[in-house]
Image (spheres, rainbow, N blue to C red):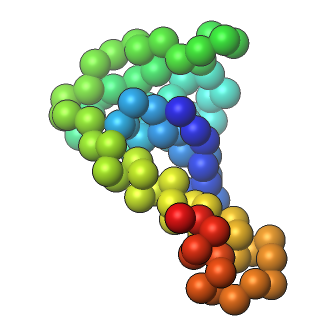
Amino acid sequence: MSIVKSSKGHDKLLLEGYSYRRANKSQIIWRCCRNDCAGRVRFDGTGYIKVTDHLHVPNPEETISVEFKSNINSGATASHDPPQRIIHQAL
């Protein structure tokens, strides 16, 4: 489980192979990033609870890719290191 920034600067939750975005500016309800899916989770203060099921299978490779890209973007904005070093640190 991790929360990263999307390409547009919004929060994105990566959980169990699925990616979620906040539902209507909510702080506790997250909905699936796919528009054709009704999957939702709720944060209860200690953990995430599944509210509705997904209409697709999880894709853990995509969540790894999103987290990797987020690490590269945050490293590039926070330091003055050359790109090769930033990518190597993200790996």
Total labels: the figure holds 0
* Residue drawn at x 33%, y 26% as measured from the top left: 39
State the image coordinates of residue 81 (x, y, percent, origin top left). Answer: 76, 84
Q: Is residue 8 visible?
A: no
Q: Position of residue 28 (x, y in %)?
A: 62, 22
In the depicted structure, whether residue 44 falls above or below residue 6: above
- Identify the image quadrant of residue 87: bottom right
The residue lying toward the viewer, choosing from 20 and 17, is 17
Left or right: 82 in relation to 47? right
What is the residue that sits farthest to the bottom in this orientation?
Answer: 82
Up-down relation of residue 25 to residue 89 (above or below): above
Q: Position of residue 85 (x, y in %)?
A: 65, 81
Of residues 43 and 65, which is closer to you in this image? 65
User: Measured along the vertical axis of the image, is residue 82 above or below residue 41?
Assistant: below
Q: Position of residue 2 (x, y in %)?
A: 58, 38
Which residue is situated farthest in the right direction here?
A: 79
Would residue 74 appear left or right of 70 to someone viewing this image? right
Q: Nearer the viewer, residue 62 or 83?
A: 83
- Position of 29 with respect to 31 (left or right) is right
Foreground: 64 or 54?
A: 64
The residue at the far left in this view is 56
Q: Residue at x 19, y 29 (%)?
A: 55
Q: Is residue 78 visible?
A: yes
